[in-house]
Amino acid sequence: MNPDPCRRGVLRYLALGAAAGGLPGAALAQTLRVSPREIVQAKDALNVSDFLPIAERTMRPAHFGYLQTGVLDDGTLDANRAAYRRWGIQARRLVDVSRIDLTTKLLGETWASPVVLAPVASQRAYHHEAERPVARAARSHGALQILSTMTNISIETVISDRQGPVWFQLYPTNDTEIAKSLVTRADKAGASAIVFTSDLLSGGMRRETQERLARTDPGDCSSCHDRSAGFADLVKRKAMFDRFDLGKARTLNNPSLTWEFVRRLRDWTEKKVLVKGIMTPEDAEMALAFGADGVIVSNHGGRAEESLMGTLDVLPAIAAKINRRIPILMDGGVRRGTDVFKALSLGASAVCVGRPYIWGLSAFGSEGVEAVLSILDEELRSVMRQAGVTRIGAIGRNNLTPI
Ligand SMILES: Cc1cc2nc3c(=O)[nH]c(=O)nc-3n(C[C@H](O)[C@H](O)[C@H](O)COP(=O)(O)O)c2cc1C
């Protein structure tokens, strides 16, 4: 029996609040509006947040905490969401919007939509088939999937399920040889780009919501996780590490890396290289100067630094600096097609979502992920009609007004 059900309820309520926008009021509306009983199949969901309470029900509290957490007071997590409310969309009338085209071109590849599946680690925590249902949904939807270094399923299997390329996200470890081998393996498997994540190199800040929810978990986490084993424990069920003698590797990230590493990455692969975790125009320019083919504006979904800067807040200055020389992707707090539209208007070429597709995955497997992608696309189409824009490339700054 749970010794402290009230406390656990409050903690879950707070975590829901963060996911729903950080405002207790928004969380309340969310919980009042949808009960898991009302959604028995993926197509019952009205919006992507409808999957959240079902996902919560299917997960252990510790895993739910890991998924939902930001850092410290979850202020940057909240800032990511809050930023969308500061922009209004210009409604335009009497434009022929009978055909809306979401086709998105990125670095020589064409995708059915600008909505991209962000890299999310360890998906077996959310579904017994882990990354495989996500790959199947990406295939049926024509979506770009970015696969985490910390995938439970091998990149070879995921690409076979996807029946097409994925992008591979790189955590470099503290051992350059391992980083190079990860890139070479992804390259050989057929990844069409390497996405180097730069925002956790020095370790993120403390994930307090995660720690609080883990304390409410009645299960025995030590049956799966042996913290005393350090890095070996961290990667023991991670398919990208299964062929390695871990050698000198001690950490997933490496605080001593500098921009030179991007140049080295360039030498290791002929595939496209992107830097994820960019939050300033200065760093976007550095990424470009050191050879990146693209950047992802991201603060790791509010899980890296507690800067209180939302990704949509910093996007316009980064877009102005880059001035279309390389594509900019963006993620953080995208929960609606209108959010996608705003990010595209402010200079993103495509927009990644993280937590929402994991809610869909844990609730309904592949169908849940497909539903999340379909809902976001349909919302995007409908706002494009209202804004009088018929193709992704035509969405621009003139479609928005600060409010
Ligand atoms: C549970 C979880 C695990 C994540 N794992 C990774 C990862 O392995 N590599 C990475 O670059 N980003 C990772 N991210 C960050 C996402 O790629 C993305 O930046 C973020 O989730 C976007 O914010 P959103 O969840 O609000 O959509 C993770 C995010 C979450 C929530």
Image (cartoon, rainbow, N blue to C red):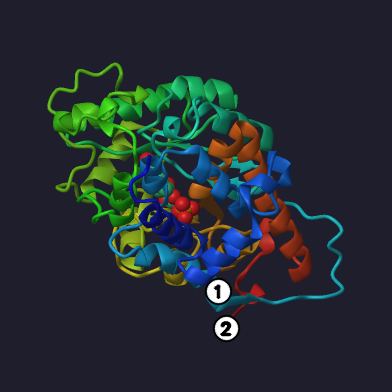
Instruction: For residue 274, say whether it is visible.
Output: no
Q: Quadrant of residue 7?
A: bottom left
Residue 105 drawn at (x, y percent) = 61, 47
Q: Which mark is residue 403?
A: 2
Q: Is the C-beta of the residue carrying label 2 under 8 Å from the nearest atom of ligand 1?
A: no
Residue shown at 44%/41% (left/top)? 119
Q: Is residue 173 above or below residue 328?
A: above
Q: Amino acid at mark 2?
A: Ile
State left or right for residue 25 relative to residue 104.
left
Q: Are marks 1 and 2 in contact (CB under 8 Å)?
A: yes
Mark 1 secondary-structure assignment: helix
Residue 327 drawn at (x, y percent) = 49, 54
CA gap between label 1 and label 2 equals 8 Å
Residue 239 drawn at (x, y percent) = 36, 23
Q: Tell me the quarter of the image containing the N terminus.
A: top left
Mark 2 secondary-structure assignment: loop
Residue shown at 57%/29% (left/top)? 133
State left or right for residue 253 relative to residue 110.
left
Label 2 packing within 10 angstroms: few (<14), some (14-19), many (20+): few
Q: Which mark is residue 11?
A: none
State left or right for residue 337 relative to residue 330.
right
Q: Amino acid at mark 1?
A: Arg
Comes first in the chain, label 1 or label 2: 1
Residue on which disc 1 sits = 85
Front residue of 329 and 234: 234
Front residue of 241 and 96: 241
Label 1 packing within 10 angstroms: few (<14), some (14-19), many (20+): few
Front residue of 107 and 83: 83
Q: Tell me the quarter of the image containing the C terminus.
A: bottom right
